[in-house]
Image (cartoon, helix red, strand yellow):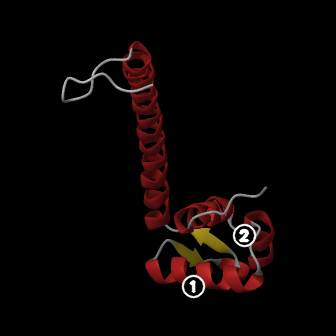
């Protein structure tokens, strides 16, 4: 099943595609966008100064677009590290619950009032 791409991912893909210069049709096929979405994103990246129109109606990445890509890839790396850290924390939590909380329930310990729990 295809995963939906987020706005920044699509913009980064467009910038990568136009690094060497590309026309609308090439960008549309490489980025797997409809013509309507392509026009929307091209308008946005042009307005932001990430892309410029070069010779022969070719789109090329602007210096600001190169800077965006650098920052975007740093963000992706950091996001992946945070994701891995959260996964490790969740595993630790599951281990704690399994090891300590399940053991208590199996041992038939008393409740908070000091009474044995019914089984």
Q: Residue at x 18, y 29 (%)?
A: 113
Q: Which mark is residue 75?
A: none
Residue 2: x, y in percent? 76, 58
Q: Which quarter of the image is occupied by the C terminus?
A: top left
Is residue 53 or residue 65 the one in the foreground? Answer: 65
The quadrant of the image that shows the N terminus is bottom right
| Residue 43, label in figure | 1
Residue where numbered disc 2 is placed:
22
Say if 30 sits above or below 49 in the image. Answer: above
Tell me, yes or no, whether the two marked residues, 1 and 2, touch with CB atoms within 8 Å. Answer: no
Asked whether, in this view, residue 48 is left or right of residue 9, the answer is left
Please state the horizontal and vertical placement of residue 65, each as a whole percent of the image: 49, 65
Q: Is residue 51 above or below residue 16?
A: below
x 42%, y 53%: residue? 71
Counting residues from the N terminus, which is met first, the one under dot 1 or under dot 2?
Answer: 2
| Mark 1 or 2: the one toward you | 1
Q: Quadrant of residue 53?
A: bottom right
- Looking at the image, the residue that sits furthest to the top is 107
Image coordinates for residue 103, horizontal then vertical, percent: 41, 15
Within 10 Å of disc 2 (Cα), the crowding (few <14, some 14-19, many 20+) is many
x and y percentages locating residue 52 in the rendered image:
56, 77
On the image, which quarter does residue 36 sit in? bottom right
Give the spatial CA distance, label 1 vs label 2. Answer: 15 Å
- Given residues 42 and 7, the one toward you in this image is 7
Q: Is 71 located above or below residue 56 in the figure? A: above
Q: Residue 39 versus residue 109: which sits nearer the camera?
A: 109
Give the secondary structure at mark 1. helix
The residue sitting at 63% across, 77% down in the picture is 54
Residue 102 lies in quadrant: top left
Question: Of helix, strand and loop, which one carries label 2?
Answer: loop
């Amino acid at each position: 099943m295809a995963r939906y791409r987020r706005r920044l991912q699509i913009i980064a893909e467009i910038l990568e595609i136009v690094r060497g210069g590309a026309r609308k049709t090439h960008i549309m096929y490489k980025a797997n966008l409809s013509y309507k979405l392509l026009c929307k994103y091209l308008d946005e990246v042009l307005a932001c100064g990430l892309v410029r129109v070069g010779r022969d109606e070719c789109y090329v990445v602007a210096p600001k677009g190169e800077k965006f890509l650098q920052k975007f890839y740093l963000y992706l790396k950091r996001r992946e590290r945070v994701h891995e850290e959260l996964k490790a924390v969740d595993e630790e939590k599951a281990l704690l619950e399994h090891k300590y909380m399940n053991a208590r329930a199996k041992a038939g310990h008393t409740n908070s009032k000091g009474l044995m729990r019914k089984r």
